[in-house]
Image: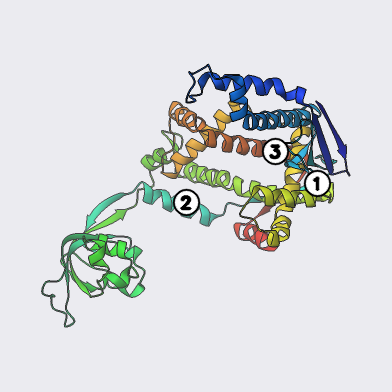
């Protein structure tokens, strides 16, 4: 067997694999004998089928299978051993013809696309803006109000003073004349929250309502005729709720109001942990620090966009093996159409070029991800997920257990490897380029994206 390759240009090559009968026949004979030991063929005992019969019955298919296996191994071993940096996958040469029935010796030819050689150097010569978002007083105020609500308590009150109050009561369906509808829907007990009403007119009917009041409103209008919401509000099934359009009279039996937490040590401990903060001044300073940390990912995201643009500009434009890649995309994705491949491909080119640049950055900084990196990232992801449900300060062993469960999934592990690699690339870029630090308000920061678009 002989394997060689020849460049047709800087971005395309052909790999040729020449094999003779001697390269594969022993493997074919061995496979046939192994098959004969297991095959159940009428008229013969298992393991006693004559080799000539096996060859006649299965020789052709086994021969094809062994040739394909031999060629595939030779192709990918050659690419690996010769360190060919290819794009996509090798494809059978369009002008290659092979007759597996008539030939014993073969020459298989494969077209391959070669990645362009890039001169990528990320250093201080590359200047990238880094925007730090200013934490203003309104941000601190909103965050404080959020914590006051989160750690507040529900109390029963006589009168509603907030549209977020929960109104509990009984309901009865009304006829067109405003009297209870005979045979209509009666709800012994339900809870409504005007804050979630879709109609401002219906919401206004509950303003200042008191215990014992009777309120006439239209449940259907309050939720834009959402069958699921109606069924829940009226304690009935969806089929019945779908036909409800009438007004209802609700007799208020109770009002639950969220009483915000007080600005005291109990709140400080709930938010930041026991005795971490001991005064209002420290509390608001910590809030400001916390918000600033939460805004860092926003700044980093904008930096990643600007850094990519700056590095791409420094590298300059470069060509890709366009014809091959379009052919490969059509062959490997049956959903793609020949008439749209040019448009599809043009949309993919920017990200493909950036991916090739990133591969060079990985080499420049010798970036790799090990088990410790994955475990640390998995714990951070677990902590973030807990935080979404308001659970902070989760013990380290719990985070580690959840992280290990994530890594046990092959799909999740692969995703985390990609995420960790991406983070290391961004860190390497951030530490190596020249950062032009700029402080901006949130409003101006958001407008930076509008300008980019």
Is any part of residue 307 visible from this angle? no
Residue at 33 percent across and 60 percent down: it is 164
Position of 144 relative to 120 (above/below): below
Considering every residue shown, the one lying at the far left of the view is 182
N-term mark: 3 or 1? 1
Q: Secondary structure at mark 2?
A: helix
- Pick the front one: 406 or 311: 406
The quadrant of the picture occupied by the N terminus is top right
The residues bearing labels 2 and 3 have C-alpha atoms spaced at a distance of 32 Å
The residues bearing labels 1 and 2 have C-alpha atoms spaced at a distance of 67 Å
Q: Which residue carries the number 3 mark?
A: 425
N-term mark: 1 or 2? 1
Q: Position of residue 380 (x, y in %)?
A: 53, 35
The answer to whether 56 appears left or right of 78 in the picture is left
- Disc number lying in front (2 or 3): 3
Q: Which residue carries the number 1 mark?
A: 95
Q: Which residue carries the number 2 mark?
A: 143
Q: Position of residue 242 (x, y in %)?
A: 27, 68
| Dot 3 crowding, Cα within 10 Å, few <14, some 14–19, many 20+ | many
Is any part of residue 276 visible from this angle? yes
The answer to whether 283 appears left or right of 87 in the picture is left
The answer to whether 54 appears left or right of 147 in the picture is right
Q: Position of residue 197 (x, y in %)?
A: 34, 67
| Dot 2 crowding, Cα within 10 Å, few <14, some 14–19, many 20+ | some
- Pick the front one: 364 or 407: 407
The residues bearing labels 3 and 1 have C-alpha atoms spaced at a distance of 42 Å
Position of 338 relative to 284 (above/below): below
Considering every residue shown, the one lying at the far front of the view is 43
Q: Position of residue 34 (x, y in %)?
A: 58, 19
């Amino acid at each position: 067997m002989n394997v060689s390759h020849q460049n047709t240009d800087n971005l395309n090559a052909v790999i040729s694999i020449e094999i003779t009968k001697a390269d594969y026949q022993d493997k074919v004979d061995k496979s046939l004998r192994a098959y004969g030991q297991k095959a159940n063929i009428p008229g013969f005992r298992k393991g006693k089928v004559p080799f000539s019969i096996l060859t006649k019955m299965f020789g052709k298919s086994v021969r094809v299978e062994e040739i394909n296996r031999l060629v595939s191994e030779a192709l990918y071993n050659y690419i690996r051993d010769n360190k060919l940096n290819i794009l996509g996958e090798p494809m059978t040469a369009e002008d290659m013809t092979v007759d597996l029935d008539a030939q014993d010796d073969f020459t298989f030819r494969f077209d391959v696309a070669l990645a362009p050689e890039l001169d990528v150097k990320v250093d201080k010569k590359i200047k990238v803006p880094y925007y730090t978002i200013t934490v203003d007083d309104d941000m601190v105020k909103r965050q404080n109000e959020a914590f006051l609500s989160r750690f507040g308590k529900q109390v029963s009150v006589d009168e509603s003073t907030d549209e977020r109050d929960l109104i509990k009561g009984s309901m009865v369906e009304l006829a067109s004349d405003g009297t209870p509808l005979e045979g209509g829907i009666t709800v012994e007990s339900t809870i409504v929250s005007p804050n979630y009403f879709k109609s401002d007119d219906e919401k206004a009917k509950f303003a200042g309502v008191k215990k014992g009041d009777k309120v006439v409103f239209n449940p259907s209008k309050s939720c834009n005729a959402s069958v699921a919401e109606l069924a829940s509000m009226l304690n009935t099934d969806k089929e019945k709720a779908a036909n409800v359009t009438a007004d209802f009279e609700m007799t208020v039996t109770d009002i639950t109001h969220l009483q915000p937490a007080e600005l005291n040590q109990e709140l400080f401990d709930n938010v930041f942990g026991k005795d971490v903060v001991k005064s209002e001044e420290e509390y608001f300073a910590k809030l400001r620090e916390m918000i600033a940390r939460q805004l860092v990912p926003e700044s980093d995201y904008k930096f990643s966009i600007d850094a990519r643009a700056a590095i791409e500009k420094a590298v300059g434009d470069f060509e890709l093996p366009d014809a091959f890649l379009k052919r490969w995309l059509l062959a490997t994705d049956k959903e793609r159409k020949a008439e749209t491949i040019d448009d599809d491909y043009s949309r993919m080119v920017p990200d493909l070029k950036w991916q090739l640049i990133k591969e060079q950055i990985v080499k420049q900084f010798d970036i790799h991800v090990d088990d410790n990196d994955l475990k640390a990232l998995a714990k951070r992801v677990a902590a973030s997920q807990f935080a979404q449900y308001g659970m902070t300060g989760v013990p380290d062993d719990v985070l580690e257990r959840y992280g290990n469960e994530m890594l046990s999934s092959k799909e999740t592990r692969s995703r985390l490897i990609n995420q960790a690699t991406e983070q290391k690339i961004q860190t390497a870029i951030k530490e190596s380029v020249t950062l032009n630090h700029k402080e901006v308000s949130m409003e101006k920061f958001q407008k930076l994206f509008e300008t980019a678009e």
